[in-house]
Image (cartoon, helix red, strand yellow):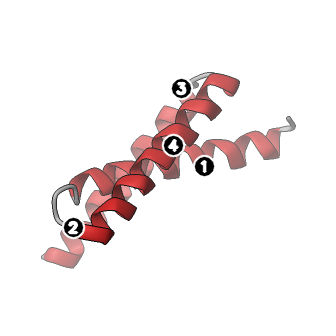
Amino acid sequence: MDKEQLIELNLLLAMFRCFNEQLYNLKGVHSGLIKRKFNHLTKVGRQYEKEVLKATGNSEELENIYDAMMELMITLKKQING
């Protein structure tokens, strides 16, 4: 894997972690068919993240990207709500 592909993969994994965290924040909001699809989506996201981390290892760079993305999301939420 070249450097550009590694950057893309780290961005994707960090985005999935942010995505999973946002899904977790919505847990319990849905019911019925939407709830089943929601639960399926969370499982797929977790499985994908586990498999890629198993294959590539957990890097400090990934954690830094994830932290930066979550900070950005928190800032955006504050701006939207405030």
Q: CA distance from mark 2 to mark 1?
A: 28 Å
SS at mark 3?
Answer: helix
How much space separates mark 2 and mark 4, taking CA atoms?
A: 30 Å
Q: Residue at coordinates 21% horizontally, 55% vertically from top-left?
A: 27
Task: Tell me, for residue 65, which label it has, or none.
Answer: 4
Foreground mark, 1 or 4?
A: 1
As helix, strand or loop, the secondary structure at mark 1 comes to helix
* Between discs 3 and 2, the one toward the N terminus: 2
Q: Which residue is mark 1?
A: 11
Please give left or right for residue 9 compared with residue 46 in the image.
Answer: right
Left or right of 15? Residue 74 is left
Residue 41, image x, y percentages = 44, 56
**Residue 7: quadrant of the picture:** top right
Q: Residues within 10 Å of mark 1 (few under 14, many from 20)?
A: some
Q: Position of residue 52 (x, y in %)?
A: 64, 34
User: Mark 2: few, some, or many residues within 10 Å (few <14, many ≥20)?
Assistant: few
Three-letter amino acid code at disc 3? Glu
Under circle 2, the secondary element is loop
The answer to which of marks 1 and 4 sits earlier in the sequence is 1
Residue positioned 20% across, 67% down in the render: 31
Q: Earlier in the sequence, mark 2 or mark 4?
A: 2
Give the x, y percent position of residue 54. 62, 23
- Label 3 vs label 2, nearer the camera: 2
Location of residue 67 in the rendering, given as x and y in whole percent from the top left corner: 40, 42
Kind of residue at badge 4: Ile
Q: Nearer the viewer, mark 2 or mark 4?
A: 2
- Circles 3 and 4: CB distance less than 8 Å? no
The residue at which mark 2 appears reads as 30
Residue highlighted by disc 3:
60
Amino acid carrying mark 2 in the image: His
Tell me the residue at 56%/44% (across/down). Answer: 13
